Image (tube, helix red, strand yellow):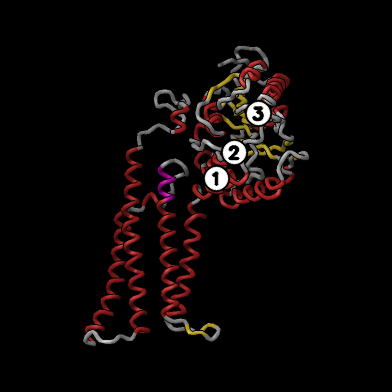
Amino acid sequence: MNSSKESGPSDPTRPMELSVVMPCLNEADTVATCVEKAVRAMKEAGIVGEVVVADNGSTDGSQELAVEQGARIVNVPQRGYGAALMHGIEASRGKYVLMGDADDSYDFLEIPKFIDSLRQGHDLVQGCRLPRGGGRVLPGAMPFLHRWFGNPVLSWLVRLMFRIPINDIYCGMRGFTRKHYDQLDLRSPGMEFATEMIIKSGLHRDSHGTSWSQVPITLHPDGRQAHPPHLRTFRDGWRTLRLFLAFSPTWTFFRPGLVLLMIGLVGYALALPQVKVFGAALDVHTLLVASLFVLMGWQCVLLATLARIFTGREGMMPPHEKLEHVTVERGLAFGIAAGIGGAAMIGFVVWRWWQQDFGALDYPFTMRWVVPGVTLVAIGFQTAMASLMSGVLMMQRSRRLDRPIAGTNEDHPTTPASPQETLS
């Protein structure tokens, strides 16, 4: 089913300025109200626009109710909040896009404040429901855990990990330019779609010159009666946190790796000379534990490097300039050198053993050579294998050099990519 009704002045010479996109799955209680408010807001503000309802397979008549109020229906067979929005946005025709839920928790009469900010040149205008950003949450509009723990904590993590000045990352009402959306190449079909948009906008702000804005809005109680909210607190919270980790190899791997390496090296500095700590002499057992920390830390550093290469090559993050110049040969050379150094230390102990006709060894002495030697061999092997793996990732880059940027067509640069391409 498809229907269309443009809002605002009827001057056919004016281009479509705004597309309001609403994901919908059995929202018969509220979708008509949301569409009516959006159409009214655009008409009163003189905005040439449309309302696109991305329907995810509703069976309660939501489509008909939305069409009656002037919406255009885009049927989306793939289930998921993100999947619905991606298809709806791809089918939109406006210069600007405003997305918002169809459960009547967002007041679409607030559309003009988003458009005003977009017209001022901002690429992304984020709504903020929390008092920290000037917003307001009406009684009963947000569950206790979401308001006082989940949303503030996850928003704080975004500010910390990605340096993005957003106070309400989970707010689903936001406006953005279609050009900016096409640059992001979003891929999440679930609830984390909105979070991915924020993170990628922040990660690409230097290369794309992204301009931000935040407007306060009021969150109203969910108007649905037929079914509970689609959001699942712990499942969707974990998926959001998992997305943070995927887009931040620095926080996921590199910084924990450095901490582990520092602990291991401190252990070596104390154990090799048998320093006494609180009366206890640290010996080879401490050395073994320190080696474990060193190996775990180095593994994290290698994973951070590989993850950063992969995310840069796949367009998830901007390419890392220094890593672009790292070669497989350099990594192999370091790995081989570390392996030879470790093998030499082990060989020295074998030579000493041979000198004593393979008799009893002085374990406190020999283990101070064997443990670091084994650790160096392991580090060398890990580094060599990781270097070869980085070569595989770089080969992927050379295969994709001629691929068009997501959301464009080589012959028609302004033609949006199809939903199938976006979701692949």
Q: On screen, 214 above or below 65?
A: below
Residue at image position (62%, 30%) is 99
Magenta-drawn stretch, dominant element (helix, strand or loop): helix
Identify the residue position indicated by label 3 in the image.
102
124, 207: nearer the viewer: 124
Name the amino acid type tagged 3: Ala
Mark 2 vs mark 3, foreground winner is 3
Q: What segment is highlighted magenta in the picture?
A: 307-313
Tag shown at residue 211: 2
What amino acid does circle 2 point to? Ser
Q: Nearer the viewer, residue 228 or 415?
A: 228
User: Marks 2/3: CA distance?
Assistant: 27 Å
Q: Which element is circle 3 on?
A: loop
Kindly identify which residue carries mark 1.
239
Q: Secondary structure at mark 2?
A: loop
Residue 371, position as x, y percentages in the image: 36, 75
Q: In the image shown, does 340 or 31 lie closer to the viewer?
A: 31
Residue drawn 70% across the image and 21% down it: 36
What is the C-alpha distance between the residues marked 3 and 1?
Answer: 22 Å
Using the image, tell me which numbered label, if any, was put on residue 108: none
Secondary structure under tag 1 reads helix
Closer to the chain start, of discs 2 and 3, is 3
Residue sitting at x 60%, y 15%: 4
**Between marks 1 and 2, how big is the CA–CA gap?**
27 Å
- Queried whether the magenta region covers residue 179, the answer comes back as no
